[in-house]
Image (cartoon, rainbow, N blue to C red):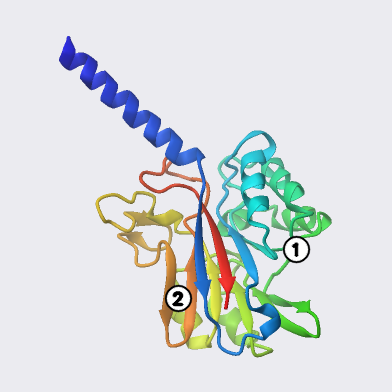
Amino acid sequence: MKKLLLVLFVIMAGAGWLYWGNITPVVTTHNVQLDDLPNEFSGLKIIQLSDLHDAEFGEGQANLIQAVTDRAPDLIFLTGDMIDSNRYDLEQSLALVRGLQQVAPMYYVTGNHEIATKEVEYIKAELSGLGVTVLSNESAQFTKGNVSLEIFGIEDPLDGVPVHHALEQHPREGAVRLTLSHRPEVFEEYVTAGEQLVFTGHAHGGQIRLWGIDGVIAPGQGFFPAYTSGVYEEAGTQMIVSRGLGNSVFPLRVGNRPEIVEVILE
């Protein structure tokens, strides 16, 4: 009887840990140095949200909205897969956007799931209507005082335009460029193009992160992926990979809490 109770306790404790680890976002902060960053942008705080996949964090996304609001960001980057094409519920994503409208300017790029819905133009229109700057292989300028930095957004390549083509057709316009792209697996293409700082998601943190393993499987990378979480640097290019917030085909994160990424430029 005691052994049975112990087994039941372990099962219940494990289930509770898994549940908690899938509904409680963690904030990860990266201080990133950029060459030629104007003094006006030193200390600029960016919140990156990625791969929501229609997950819900409190009624009307209240918990997620509060967590972002508490960080008082200057900019918010949404790097794709705000919805899930398998259980499409745009309203859950729009609730998050509405709750963040007054917090900071928002910039968005598509992920593969938006493209897969075949309703990507409608999704973009809804986001634009809420004041989000939608970037589809194009740039916007963010100005502070008399200086600007370029924010470039790459449409997910599922739309038919490979990432390297988008980069070739839109070279950097100014001294400082922040690039939003859903895909981390093409890191070498960002390096070749000379991108400075790239914000990506898509990998879901490798889904399972236990016993020192930095992720077991990721879309576009397969088993034991190379790019799952944190900052990767090569030849002057830095790439940030968000672990994301929700799940898609595999319904659970293991040792891999949903992530809000905070980046402070220096």
Q: Quadrant of the N terminus?
A: top left
Q: Residue at x 62, y 72 (%)?
A: 154
Q: Quadrant of the C terminus?
A: bottom right
Q: Position of residue 47 (x, y in %)?
A: 61, 61
Q: Position of residue 61 (x, y in %)?
A: 65, 40
- Evaluate if marks 1 and 2 touch, with contact meaning CB atoms under 8 Å apart: no
Viewer-nearest residue: 146 or 163: 146
Q: List the residue tagged with mark 2.
A: 187
In the image, is residue 6 above or below residue 208?
above
Viewer-nearest residue: 106 or 79: 106
**What separation in Å lies between label 1 and label 2 (alpha carbons)?**
26 Å
Tell me if mark 1 has few (under 14), some (14-19) or many (20+) residues whose alpha carbon lies within 10 angstroms of its own. some
Badge nearest the viewer, 1 or 2: 1
Q: Quadrant of residue 204?
A: bottom left
Q: Which mark is residue 86?
A: none
Q: List the residue tagged with mark 1.
A: 105
Q: Quadrant of residue 188?
A: bottom left
In the image, is residue 92 above or below residue 101?
above
Left or right, 192 with reference to 71: left
Left or right, 204 with reference to 49: left
Disc 2 residue type (three-letter):
Phe
Disc 1 residue type (three-letter):
Pro
Q: Position of residue 63 (x, y in %)?
A: 62, 40
Query: Does the rendering let one see residue 241?
Result: yes
Q: Residue at x 60, y 43 (%)?
A: 54
